[in-house]
Amino acid sequence: MNESQAAIARPDEAEGDRTQRGIQSIEVGGQLLKALVHHGRPMALKDLARDADMTPAKAHPYMVSFGRLGLVEQDRSSGHYRLGPLALQLGLIGLQQADPVHVATPLLAGLAREVGHTVAIAVWGDRGATIVRLAEAPSPVHVNMRHGTVFSLTNTASGRLFGAFLPADTVRALL
């Protein structure tokens, strides 16, 4: 498992969890959901089944159950399946619970070594893009950057990136 995989390990990949008993039917049905997510578009049952390595007859009851739960919906005219409202809710809550700084921090030192430059993680603070994590380059160039440094909104790549995606009123207040 590489650093990025270790940072966001699934429960079945966690240390010592390899012997835990799972529910095979959930894991089998999960292959259908993975296929739907992988393709990113509505799919016919036969295509979903093929991608999940099962027959359409085996896949159909799973899709019926997923539909009852709201994980998938079936288009009445085409018969294609797409992710449903529960899948959307799960995704949104997953994003809300994600801590990008926690996920990115273990990767920082390796990235600095790989690119040969100092690498920083910045978050939006009350005064602008603010460094919260820093990994020095293997051969550091002396730059006055440390935790708490606030990047210029207009004269740094980090500041410009935040400025491009934040609400205009937020950006204007700092110009």
Image (cartoon, rainbow, N blue to C red):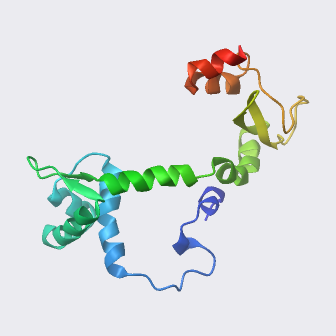
Above-or-below relation of 94 to 119: below
Above-or-below relation of 12 to 174: below
Residue toward you, 6 or 161: 161
Above-or-below relation of 153 to 33: above
- Residue drawn at (68%, 17%) of the image: 173
Q: Position of residue 111 (x, y in %)?
A: 71, 45
Q: In this view, does 66 lie to the left or right of 165?
A: left
Q: Can residue 116 be seen in this view?
A: no
Which corner quadrant of the image does residue 86 belong to? bottom left
- Residue drawn at (65%, 53%) of the image: 103
Q: Is residue 137 visible?
A: yes
Which corner quadrant of the image does residue 131 belong to? top right
- Residue drawn at (30%, 59%) of the image: 71
Residue toward you, 95 or 172: 172
- Residue drawn at (35%, 53%) of the image: 37
The mark total stands at 0
Residue with the most extreme left position:
77
Quadrant of the snapshot with the C terminus: top right
Above-or-below relation of 20 to 99: below
Q: Position of residue 76 (x, y in %)?
A: 10, 50
Quadrant of the snapshot with the N terminus: bottom right
